[in-house]
Amino acid sequence: MRVVLDTNIFISAVLGGTLGIILDEWKAGKFKLIITDEIAREYLDVINRPKFKIPSDEIVATTDYLLQTAEFVTPQEKIQVIVADLTDNKFLEAAIAGKVNFIVSGDNHLLVLKSFKEIPIITGREFIIWLERQ
């Protein structure tokens, strides 16, 4: 199972709560997280924002795990499907380059597509339900 997580899903999972299950399942090896350099930079930028009050030891542990276990891919094509927020296209590019099974997002610009090149775009809750059924 290969998955791209939008930044809001990744950060929400780190913060815990319901979406924390996604982080637990990733660490348990239930799916392979597919990212690009650009996505990794965004994850690291956001996880370090003071407003989230994530303890520095947790940031270090999560960052280390991310860099060691996520599969980095290099997009071969530039996609510009989402014009309302061009930065969201990086998740589509990663999904194509990484041949993923799902894009998991909380971003309406992505969710409204429902799928991209036959890759389903689902919410965090939908992904959790899918994981529980496996």
Image (cartoon, helix red, strand yellow):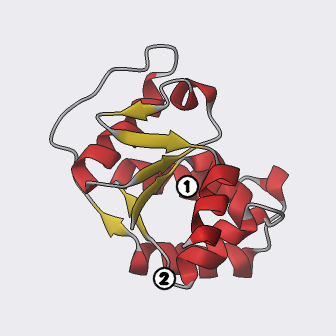
Residue 113 position in % (x across, y down): 48, 25
* Residue 111 against residue 36 in the figure, above or below: above
Height in image: 76 above or below 86? below
Q: Residues within 10 Å of mark 2 (few under 14, many from 20)?
A: few
- Report if residue 48 is visible in the image: no
Dot 1: what SS? helix
Percent position of residue 118, x then y: 32, 38
70 relative position to 104: left or right:
left
- The image quadrant that residue 105 belongs to is top right
Image point 49% across, 31% down: which residue?
114
Residue type, numbered disc 2: Gly
> The residue under label 1 is which amino acid type?
Tyr
Taking the view exactly as shown, the residue that stands out farthest to the left is: 76
Q: Residue at x 51, y 80 (%)?
A: 65
Residue in view at x 70 percent, y 62 percent: 13
Residue receiving disc 1 = 43
Which of marks 1 and 2 precedes in the sequence? Answer: 2
Q: How many numbered discs sit on the rendered protein?
A: 2
In the picture, measured across the screen, residue 53 lies left or right of residue 86, that is right
Which is more toward the observer, 31 or 69?
31
Question: Which residue is under mark 2?
Answer: 29
Residue situated in front as seen by the camera: 58 or 123: 123
Give the image location of residue 28, x and y in percent: 55, 85
State the CA–CA distance, disc 2 to disc 1.
20 Å
Residue 1 visible, this angle:
yes
